[in-house]
Image (spheres, rainbow, N blue to C red):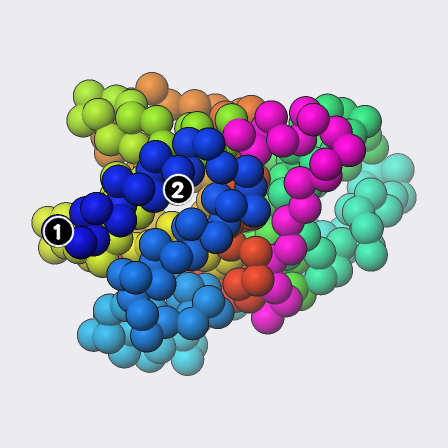
Amino acid sequence: MRLLKWFVIFFVTAAFANPEQDQLLFRQHYQKLFPKLKLQDYADGIYAIDADARESWQIIEEFPPYELAIEAGEKWFNEPFANGKHYSDCLPNKGIAISHLYPKWDESQGKVITLALALNQCLEKNGEKPLPYQKGKIAEILAYLAYTSRDKLINIKIPDTDPRALKAYQQGKQYYYQRRGQLNFSCAICHVQNAGKFIRSERLSPSLGHTSNWPTYRLKWGEIGTLHRRFIGCHRQIRAKIPEPQSDELRNLEYFLSYMGNGIPINGPSIRK
């Protein structure tokens, strides 16, 4: 009963909070649910709260199936375009150890830029065809880039000099809490309200740190895939209208979730069920 009361207060307060207050409330909620966890523990997702699943996960991580994706991603990343340019010519720090800084607000474009979108914009700028966003080559490149950012803390900025950035954040927040689909679910119903509880045979992971491990090799997929592929899968599960990968809705959702995870270390690519 006490937790339910806290949950109601959490949602009512969050509706009127600014990003800093949102982040504080988010963390306080999970601290009450999982008092033994430290902030950095949330990088492990469900394996931070499920001891049995964690043991199996750690065994798989000894010889991780995503290693081939990292190698392929490094190859694709360093392969020159037809004009002799590279991805590194488009990205800060030549693309190395920057994953923890994305998504970021781009004032000139007036929108949130994810690292996946930045890669495809680089391709188009250099006369190349953009890559499909959910799996394949782009997931492998993102795996390599995430690997170069391992253990760096998520550090997402919402600049107060451009009100459009705050609007994008707020839209991502609204999308996160909004019910949709035939099942009338929101992201928050599963991963905030019911985090740690079982749905069928699976335990629901907390949203805190949800963006830290991507791209991810999912055992269900048998391959590595992107965060937006997972977003789309959630929409499909609740029988909701499927948004396009890298749509405004999903990029803004990623912006909100990543900001909530500030201070959590990147450990992608990783493995999930």
Give the residue type at disc 1: Met
* Residue at (33, 38) in percent of width and height: 11
Label drawn at residue 188: none
SS at circle 2:
helix
In the rendering, at what x and y percent does residue 247 appear?
A: 54, 25
User: Label 1 vs label 2: CA separation?
Assistant: 33 Å
Q: Is residue 148 visible?
A: yes
In the rendering, at what x and y percent does residue 90 appear?
A: 82, 43
Give the residue type at disc 2: Arg
SS at circle 1:
loop
Please give the residue where the numbered disc 1 appears in the rendered image. Answer: 1
Q: Quadrant of residue 163?
A: top right
* Residue at (59, 70) in percent of width and height: 151
Q: State the residue in front, 46 or 4.
A: 4
Magenta span: chief secondary structure: loop
Residue 34 relative to residue 118: left or right: left
Magenta run includes residue 261: no
Please give the residue where the numbered disc 2 appears in the rendered image. Answer: 230
| The magenta segment | 151-170
* Residue at (63, 43) in percent of width and height: 103
Contact check, label 1 and label 2, Cβ < 8 Å: no
Q: Is residue 57 above or below residue 15?
A: below
Residue 215 relative to residue 165: left or right: left
In the rendering, at what x and y percent does residue 52 appear?
A: 20, 74
Which image quarter is the C terminus in?
bottom left
Q: State the residue in front, 11 or 170.
A: 11
Magenta run includes residue 164: yes
Q: State the residue in front, 148 or 44.
A: 44
